[in-house]
Amino acid sequence: MAVRLGLDASQPYASCAVSTDLGIVASLSMERPIENFPALIRNTLSQAHVNLEEIDEIVVCIGPGSQTGVRSAVVTGNALALALDKPVTGVLATDAAAVLSPAGQEGNVAVSAGRRRWYVENYRWEGEKLCRSGEMQLADEMPPDAFSVFSANAADAEARKTCAYGILMVAEGQRHLIEQSLLSEIRPYEKREDC
């Protein structure tokens, strides 16, 4: 049974999710600050009835989004990967939003860039395969036709699917998108034999 841990802090709410062969079995989110990340991971693993040692892969949101949040999630993911000797994989927040969009929806996906700006990327479906249709853009306003999934506020954050949930869905079913992401920037350092 493959067990994946998803970590995200690029959005207004930090989130963590766990998936197994049964699908996504736990997903929690909480307001930042990032110092709460260890407790969020612990609580999500507990809800999923999974031990840290059972994790086979760590999946981290590499942005776009909060620069401090992305760095925190990447460092946490790298530390866990190094400690557990497991692979770490990076997924874009826009890919996670696209995979969580209403079934079969095509077009623009928008993710908050902060300060009332948006990262916008266009997606299309080719059968079961999600494909990017161009370059990511930074917009001063959210396009009226864009789908936004990570703008949850305190009242409805738990009711929405989190970015960690979405990145696990990409890692499970849309791995072709991962090959195009910035994997080399988040791989854990190689262990040196002379250390």
Image (tube, helix red, strand yellow):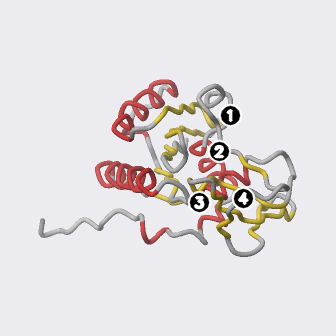
In the rendered structure, the answer to whether residue 147 lies left or right of residue 54 reads right
Q: How many marks?
A: 4
Q: CA distance from mark 1 to mark 4?
A: 22 Å
Residue type, mark 2 in image: Phe
Q: Secondary structure at mark 4?
A: loop
Question: Residue, x 70% and y 63% (percent of image)?
Answer: 120
Residue with the mark numbered 1: 160
In the rendered structure, the answer to whether residue 157 lies left or right of residue 53 reads right
Residue with the mark numbered 4: 141
Instruction: Find residue 190 and report its horizontal and vertical position in percent.
Output: 29, 68
Residue with the mark numbered 2: 150
Q: CA distance from mark 2 to mark 3?
A: 13 Å
Q: CA distance from mark 1 to mark 3?
A: 18 Å
Residue with the mark numbered 3: 92
User: Which quadrant of the figure contains the C terminus?
Assistant: bottom left
Question: Residue, x 54% and y 38% (percent of image)?
Answer: 17
Q: Secondary structure at mark 2?
A: loop
Q: Secondary structure at mark 1?
A: loop
Instruction: Find residue 7 and report its horizontal and vertical position in percent.
Output: 48, 46
Residue type, mark 4 in image: Glu
Measured along the vertical axis of the image, is residue 54 above or below residue 185?
above
Q: CA distance from mark 4 to mark 3?
A: 20 Å
